[in-house]
Image (cartoon, grey):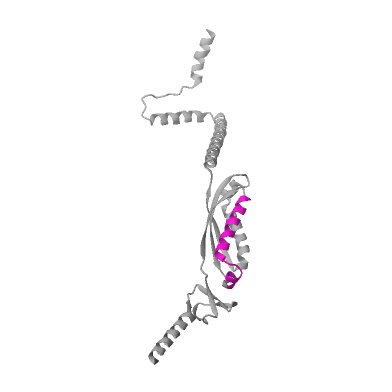
């Protein structure tokens, strides 16, 4: 009987120690309830609980990556799109995260979905596509303010993808093509205008210095000869042909 009693005592002690001694990692905190009342958060390291009387809720303090599924949104200019996002948050106050909200992860997820729909629905499509950083900052500010009473800190929000209807994609492609054609025409017109200005300046210089025209003729001959052509052009001044033209007109 003494042996059986000793074994029973050892089993009882081991069971007591197993239920009383807890080890928490560096990134974990244990929120302790004693007879249903909050007595504080402990950890990391070794903590001792009173069996049956104490209850511990473990909270992870590491940054959580929350994937917000695609949300059906109608923008301010009545375009239907699907927007998905990712939210980065962490628990700063483990006691608030356990006591003030039933499930802080689920609550943050639902709040992120509704906030994403609300903010994106207030923006026009062009603004939503072009000013994504502004949209991210606005969503992050709203989430951080609303989750602060829960002891949760939302550090970053990123809109991952914006899915457009196929009809809208084709319309935007046509718009982009028309914009590129408009820019090409403007650039071509500006080039023609600049060329006309330079030709006007060159004409004024040639009018002041007629010898430059002969030099231009010689430069043109040099360029033609460099092409290995069998035809050679010789410029003849009109003044040499003027007597013959006058003679024919008199006859």
Q: Which residues are magenta?
A: 95-122
Q: Judge whether 197 appears above or below 27 on screen.
A: above
Q: Nearer the viewer, residue 95 or 137?
A: 95
Percent position of residue 119, x then y? 61, 53
Q: Nearer the viewer, residue 149 or 239?
A: 149
Would you say residue 8 sits in the magenta stretch?
Answer: no
Percent position of residue 167, x then y? 53, 40
Chief SS of the magenta region = helix
Percent position of residue 70, x then y? 53, 52
Q: Residue at x 60, y 71 (%)?
A: 99
Instruction: Name the outermost residue toward the bottom.
Output: 2
Q: Nearer the viewer, residue 6 or 210?
A: 6
Q: Nearer the viewer, residue 91 or 108?
A: 108
Q: Residue at x 60, y 57 (%)?
A: 139
Instruction: Name the outermost residue toward the top.
Output: 251
Q: Judge whether 171 appears above or below 85 on screen.
A: above
Q: Judge whether 212 appears above or below 77 on screen.
A: above
Instruction: Name the outermost residue toward the front.
Output: 1
Q: Residue at x 54, y 79 (%)?
A: 54
Quadrant into which the N terminus falls: bottom left
Would you say residue 109 sits in the magenta stretch?
Answer: yes
Percent position of residue 161, x then y? 52, 51
Q: Quadrant of residue 224?
A: top left
Q: Residue at x 61, y 57 (%)?
A: 138
Q: How many discs appear?
A: 0
Q: Quadrant of residue 157?
A: bottom right
């Amino acid at each position: 009987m003494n042996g059986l009693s000793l074994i029973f005592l050892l089993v009882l002690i081991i069971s007591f120690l197993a239920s009383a001694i807890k080890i928490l990692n560096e990134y974990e905190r244990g929120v302790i309830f004693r007879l249903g009342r909050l007595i504080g958060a402990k950890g990391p390291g070794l903590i001792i609980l009173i069996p049956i009387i104490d209850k511990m809720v473990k909270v992870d303090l590491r940054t959580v990556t929350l994937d917000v599924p695609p949300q059906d949104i109608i923008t301010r200019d009545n375009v239907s799109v699907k927007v998905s996002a990712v939210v980065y948050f962490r628990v700063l106050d483990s006691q608030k995260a356990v006591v003030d909200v039933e499930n802080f992860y689920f609550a943050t997820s639902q709040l992120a979905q509704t906030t994403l729909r609300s903010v994106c629905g207030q923006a026009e499509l062009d603004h939503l596509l072009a000013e994504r950083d502004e949209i991210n900052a606005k969503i992050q500010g709203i989430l951080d303010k609303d989750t602060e009473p829960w002891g949760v800190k939302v550090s970053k929000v990123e809109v991952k993808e914006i899915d457009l209807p196929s009809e809208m994609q084709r319309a935007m492609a046509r718009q982009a093509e028309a914009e590129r054609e408009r820019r090409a025409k403007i650039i071509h017109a500006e080039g023609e205008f600049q060329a006309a200005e330079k030709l006007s300046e060159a004409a004024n210089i040639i009018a002041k210095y007629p010898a430059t025209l002969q030099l231009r003729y010689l430069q043109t001959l040099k360029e033609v000869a460099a092409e290995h052509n069998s035809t050679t052009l010789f410029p003849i001044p009109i003044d040499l042909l003027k007597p013959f033209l006058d003679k024919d007109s008199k006859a």
